[in-house]
């Protein structure tokens, strides 16, 4: 009996009643390092489109020409807040959470190049790709109409009855070769690799 | 405004029943909805209850990018919910199809093609706080003074 009275007294304490009926979780604050939608810094965008090319979400980011400057625009509802565009931008135009601080501290960056691949089973050795490539034309104005060339400086040429790729690193990724190939045999792919610059050893 | 309506408003503001339907998501947003139920976010302290039964729901959370099997069934679920009701799109998927919105994938976004969507919570996935505040901000707009309209 004593214990029942004790419990009733205990539960009638205003403090307890208040806690029981009005318990609330403290409002949650978004931490400062939260990776939200990328925002613009005051740096100037050069219109290199690195951010657009690395974005994994279709329609996540677009770099638009506004009056006389380029402005990247992020579309919520498409953007997945991965932060890759922030890392890929060499100018530091975009910012999100502490990504910029970390990439600066760890000296990480993205290196990219274009990879050319010809599917020999589809290719019919027409040479359209070699002829249409604007860099090939620059390197060897005497380029043959069948894609043969005597210059070793061209990106690719017809050699021994097939397309031989010599200087992949000169490719600008324009994809002219891809659009001129009748068989979709040649493919241009943009390759990206994360690189880590070693910290200089302090003397 | 009648006293009865006042009582209804007061009750409804503390009793929001939620059903969620996954129409083809990666499960990420489902996990964030689940996190809302956990003590850290504690959705029930706001009077929001997750039942997953459309017959007693007020709010339908649509998650996922609408796969072909869901194209005709999403509407069925919506029709089962009694008035007043509201649908909220959770995540990028029902808004745009997110990363699945490309050639060769079996998705038919957006969800607003099939049922009226009142609010969208973008994110992949959205944070639990974003889901919570979306439900809390959209509910009074729909349920307050419903009978007087
Ligand atoms: S954060 Fe990721 S998804 Fe969003 S725009 Fe940048 S690269 Fe695209
Ligand atoms: S935001 Fe950066 S990466 Fe994107 S186009 Fe501008 S300079 Fe290039
Ligand atoms: S992408 Fe352009 S530059 Fe590169 S090989 Fe093809 S045509 Fe030449
Ligand atoms: S254009 Fe296409 S088919 Fe013709 S040589 Fe080049 S890769 Fe082969």
Image (tube, coloured by chain):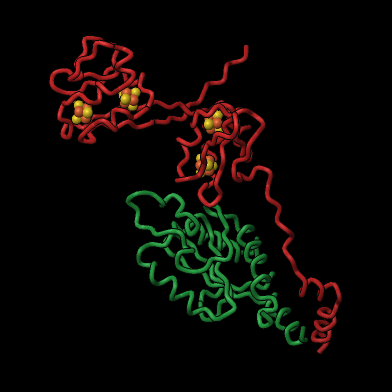
Which residue is rendered at x = 47% and y = 45% of the image? A59
The picture places residue A54, in percent across and down from the top left corner, at 46, 36
Tell me if A71 is positioned left or right of A180 in this view. right
The quarter of the displayed image where residue A136 is located: top left
Which residue is rendered at x = 77% and y = 86% of the image? B3
Ligand 3 occupies quarter? top left
Residue located farthest toward the front when viewing the structure as drawn: A67
Residue located farthest toward the left when viewing the structure as drawn: A161
Tell me if B16 is positioned left or right of A77 in this view. right
Tell me if B146 is positioned left or right of A12 in this view. left
The number of numbered discs placed on residues in the rendered structure image is 0
Tell me if A145 is positioned left or right of B17 in this view. left
The chain coloured green in the image: B
The picture places residue A162, in percent across and down from the top left corner, at 16, 23
Observer-nearest of A129 and A113: A129
The relative height of residue B12 versus residue B113 in the rendered view (above or below) is below
Image hue for chain A:
red
The picture places residue A8, in percent across and down from the top left corner, at 82, 84
The quarter of the displayed image where residue B67 is located: bottom left
């Amino acid at each position: 009996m004593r214990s029942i009275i004790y419990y009733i007294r205990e539960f009638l304490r205003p403090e307890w009643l208040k806690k029981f009926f009005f318990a609330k979780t403290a409002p949650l604050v978004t931490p400062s390092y939260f990776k939200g939608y990328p925002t613009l810094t005051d740096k100037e965008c050069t219109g290199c489109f690195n951010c657009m090319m690395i974005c994994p979400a279709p329609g996540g980011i677009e770099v638009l020409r506004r009056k006389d400057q380029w402005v990247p625009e992020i579309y919520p509802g498409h953007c997945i807040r991965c932060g890759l565009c922030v890392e890929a931008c060499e100018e530091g135009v975009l910012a999100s959470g502490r990504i910029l601080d970390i990439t600066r501290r760890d000296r990480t960056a993205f290196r990219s190049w274009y990879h050319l691949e010809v599917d020999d089973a589809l290719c019919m050795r027409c040479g359209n790709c070699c002829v249409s490539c604007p860099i090939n034309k620059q390197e060897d104005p005497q380029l043959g109409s069948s894609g043969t060339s005597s210059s070793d400086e061209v990106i690719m040429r017809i050699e021994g009855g097939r397309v031989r790729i010599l200087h992949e690193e000169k490719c600008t990724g324009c994809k002219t070769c891809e659009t001129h190939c009748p068989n979709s045999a040649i493919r241009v792919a943009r390759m990206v690799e994360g690189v880590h610059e070693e910290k200089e050893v302090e003397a | 405004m009648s006293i009865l309506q006042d009582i209804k408003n007061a009750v409804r503001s503390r009793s929001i029943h939620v059903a969620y339907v996954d129409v083809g998501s990666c499960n990420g947003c489902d996990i964030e909805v689940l996190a809302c139920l956990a003590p850290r976010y504690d959705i029930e302290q706001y009077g929001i209850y997750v039942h997953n039964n459309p017959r007693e729901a007020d709010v339908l959370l649509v998650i996922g990018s609408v796969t072909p099997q869901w194209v005709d069934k999403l509407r069925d679920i919506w029709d089962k919910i009694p008035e007043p009701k509201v649908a909220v799109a959770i995540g990028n998927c029902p808004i745009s199809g997110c990363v699945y919105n490309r050639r060769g994938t079996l998705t038919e976004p957006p969800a607003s093609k099939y049922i009226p969507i009142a609010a969208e919570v973008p994110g992949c996935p959205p944070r639990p706080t974003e889901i919570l505040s979306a439900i809390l901000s959209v509910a009074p707009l729909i349920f307050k003074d419903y009978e007087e309209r």
